[in-house]
Amino acid sequence: MVIVHDIFICKPGNASKLAKLFKEVMTGNEELVNIMTDMTGQYNRVIMVSQYESLTAYENSWEKYKQDTEAMKKMTEAMAGYQDMYLTGSREIYQTW
């Protein structure tokens, strides 16, 4: 099992907005586990947690985002401007035992 954390460090006042946007747009995504915001540690952080059977399954999941489908067009439209809400980000990939 592979757990992926996509971490976004948001501009002040935007963490809850970005978390809400991710929650709305990613509804129905079977890999999505949680959208989290910080309670301690670094401020203004949003972490999107997803889970995959393997690293290959994670890599294959990116293929659906490359397709020019109506669903992807709607997602792109809904996510317009999300880059303006955060300063930087990173990704952590963990293997569970």
Image (spheres, grey):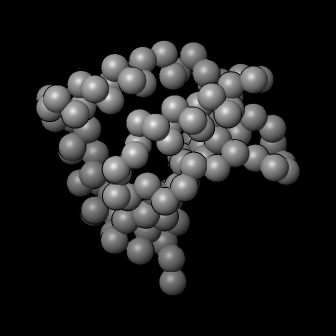
Q: In the rendering, at what x and y percent does residue 89 appear?
A: 60, 36
Position of 79 with respect to 70 (left or right) is right
Q: Residue at x 54, y 55 (%)?
A: 34
Total numbered labels:
0
Q: In the rendering, at what x and y percent does residue 39 appear?
A: 81, 49
Q: In the rendering, at what x and y percent does residue 80 appear?
A: 42, 17
Q: Residue furthest bottom?
A: 97
Q: Say whether residue 9 is visible.
A: no
Q: Residue at x 67, y 33 (%)?
A: 16
Q: Say whether residue 2 is visible.
A: yes
Q: In the rendering, at what x and y percent does residue 41 appear?
A: 84, 48
Position of 48 with respect to 56 (left or right) is right
Q: Residue at x 24, y 31 (%)?
A: 72
Position of 11 with respect to 8 (left or right) is right
Q: Is residue 15 above or below residue 51?
A: above
Quadrant into which the N terminus falls: bottom left
Position of 45 with respect to 41 (left or right) is left
Is residue 80 or residue 97 the one in the foreground? 80
Is residue 67 or residue 77 the one in the foreground? 77
Q: Is residue 43 above or below residue 58?
A: above
Q: Is residue 77 above or below residue 47?
A: above
Q: Residue at x 34, y 50 (%)?
A: 28
